[in-house]
Amino acid sequence: MGITAMIPGTTIDGLLSEAKERWHDIFDPEALRMQVMIICPRKERKILEMHGDMVEHGQPVIGVFHRPRAEARLLEEQGLNPRDASFEFLDLATSDLGPWMQHMVTTEKWVRGSISVQPVPFSVDVPAQRAFENITMICFRHPSLPAIERYYLPFPPTSILNKCFVSLPRRQAAELARQQAEVLGVGRSAEPATPEPIMVEEPPVATPESVEVSDVEIPAQESVPLPAIEIDESDDPQSVTDAITKATTDGFEEMQAAGDELQEMNAPLPTTPVETEDVVSEPVFETPQIEIEFRALVTELMANGVEPSDMVDDPRWESINERAAAVGFETWPVFMEITSVQ
């Protein structure tokens, strides 16, 4: 059984030119190779992509699918709906053609025929195309699909740029295929050898030598003389009688000093004469009688609803103004004060 890998963005010619470098001894450049076309139902394309996983073959098999677009109407004119089918071009060794197609032909009754692969006519609007000679190749068709005689391509089959499906023939190629591209099928690869454990030698640890106690000599330490402490003679009494006498004398002296201090605190403080300043009272000015009468007159007239401009018509107004002029009292400021407040 083989293992299938997908390599994107390449062509059959590109892979064949790098086959020896890619697959080394798996690829035999002296083997005779051929191209065939396979037309299968659209729903079976995934099975066809991994067909190499179920077939024994001796050389790498390269397949590329093509989807007709602008040239689709040319197939419809031949009675084939391009949406119902998938179209694959295979490049394989002639010795692998029998094993590759055996199950499909004998069991599924695929039909073998021939087809002419031609360049797309210039009348069809294809943005990029290249002229090439007509190629007649073997075609295998599923029995559910109608037969066609011509298939149109913008480039030769081996120059179609698309995803290429490569089926490598030997189990030991599984790891190599995984390194080249995404693995689609389930292939068998040799189990990796179990790595042997690596023994790490630890460096020897030096053992400390034993020493006898009798061999250890401890040097004698020289003694250091302590400094002499000078003791001053004290005047304190050396006998109990002297101590009591001294304590009694000191106690009487402290009591006498405390009594003197208490007498000083109880002594009357000298009185300091306080000088009192004469308070000068401000003179109280009495309101003149004429002002009182004038204010009462104006207030009364205003209370009666008399306008300020009509107050001069009151008979009392002239008499009060004459008396005010006699004593030097000005009625106008008082009149303005009262009328403005009201």
Image: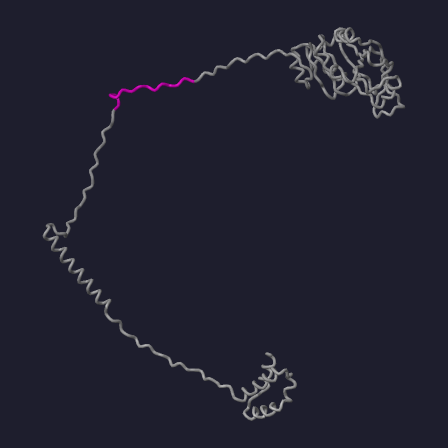
Residue 181 horizontal/vertical position (percent): 68, 19
Q: Is residue 234 visible?
A: yes
Instruction: Please tell me which residue lies in front, 330 or 193.
Output: 330
Q: Out of 230 and 222, give the one closest to the viewer.
A: 230
- Residue 104, by quadrant, is top right
- The residue at the far front in this view is 304
Main structural element of the magenta stretch: helix, strand or loop? loop
The magenta region covers 203-216
Rendering coords of residue 31 (x, y %): 75, 8
Q: Quadrant of residue 293?
A: bottom right
- Name the one closer to the observer, 22 or 286: 286
Relative image position of residue 59 (x, y in whole percent): 72, 9
Quadrant the C terminus occupies = bottom right
Q: How is the image coloured?
A: one colour
Q: Is residue 277 above or below residue 264?
A: below
- Give the quarter of the image for residue 205: top left
**Image quarter of the N terminus:** top right
* Magenta-drawn stretch contains 207: yes
State whether residue 109 is above or below residue 71. Answer: above
Residue 31 magenta-highlighted: no
Q: Is residue 30 left or right of residue 265?
A: right
Q: Is residue 43 left or right of residue 202?
A: right
Q: Nearer the viewer, residue 138 or 281?
A: 281
Residue 32 screen position, x and y as percent: 77, 8
- Residue 32 in view: no
Q: Is residue 146 left or right of residue 2?
A: right
Residue in the image at 60% along x and 12% along y: 191
Query: How many numbered tags mark residues here?
Result: 0
